[in-house]
Amino acid sequence: MAQRAFPLVRVADDLELLPDDGNRYEILDGVLHVTPAPAINHQRLLGQLYIRLHAYAAANGLEVLMAPVDVRASEVTQVQPDLLVLPQHFPEEAATRWVPMARVVLTIEILSPSTTIVDRGRKRRLYVEAGVTEYWIVDPKRRCVEIWRADAASADVATDTLIWQPWPSEAPLQVDLPALFEGSARCG
């Protein structure tokens, strides 16, 4: 099923009125986007990425969260990235319903047939314009990761080793991408 956009909900606060029906509801510039639940292989890859990021993030004062987590850029833009990384000591009272986009250190979207156009288009622009330090587009078909940085005009593409270094004073995280993609395909 393809992703559909409906000009029904125009304010992020209205998303709470929508049904809890297994679909992902996001609003981008006042337009509601409804995406079906991800496929099993998408979820396997998401889990493998979470496992690889979690310990590294915790050791570096960061926290990794998995969808569904609402991230708000404005009153008319709220999204649910597949994975996001925040400072570990994010004030709980400020994050009861959603996370401000300005607090996000890393955002990750795993491409699915129903999300590719939005993930590579509007969401990419949103994350870059909002100042998210890095945005990864994980492409399971091509078995690569596009790395968009806030200060870059184009993406770096990793096919062998994905390197992430949020703090220059700390050792980088290195992810073996062939093993990641192979491991997520064999899970379960």
Image (cartoon, rainbow, N blue to C red):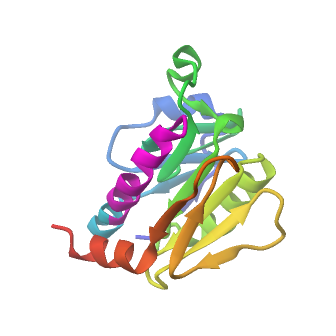
Residue 116 in percent (x, y) is at: 55, 71
| Residue at x 52%, y 66% (from the top left corner) | 115
The answer to whether any part of residue 80 appears in the image is: no
Magenta: main secondary structure equals helix
Badge count: 0
Part of the protein shown in magenta: 45-62
Name above or below for residue 175 compared with residue 54.
below
Q: Residue 152 colored magenta? A: no
| Residue at x 53%, y 51% (from the top left corner) | 81
Q: Residue most toward the top?
A: 93
Q: Is residue 44 left or right of residue 95?
A: left
| Residue at x 64%, y 58% (from the top left corner) | 135
Between residue 49 and residue 176, name the one nearer to us: 176
Residue 138 in percent (x, y) is at: 51, 70
Q: Residue 46 colored magenta? A: yes
Name above or below for residue 66 compared with residue 16.
below
Between residue 9 and residue 49, name the one nearer to us: 49
Q: Is residue 144 left or right of residue 66?
A: right
The quadrant of the image that shows the N terminus is: bottom left
The quadrant of the image that shows the C terminus is: bottom left
Q: Residue most toward the bottom?
A: 142
The answer to whether any part of residue 38 appears in the image is: yes
| Residue at x 33%, y 56% (from the top left corner) | 47
Residue 75 in percent (x, y) is at: 71, 32
Residue 45 in percent (x, y) is at: 35, 65
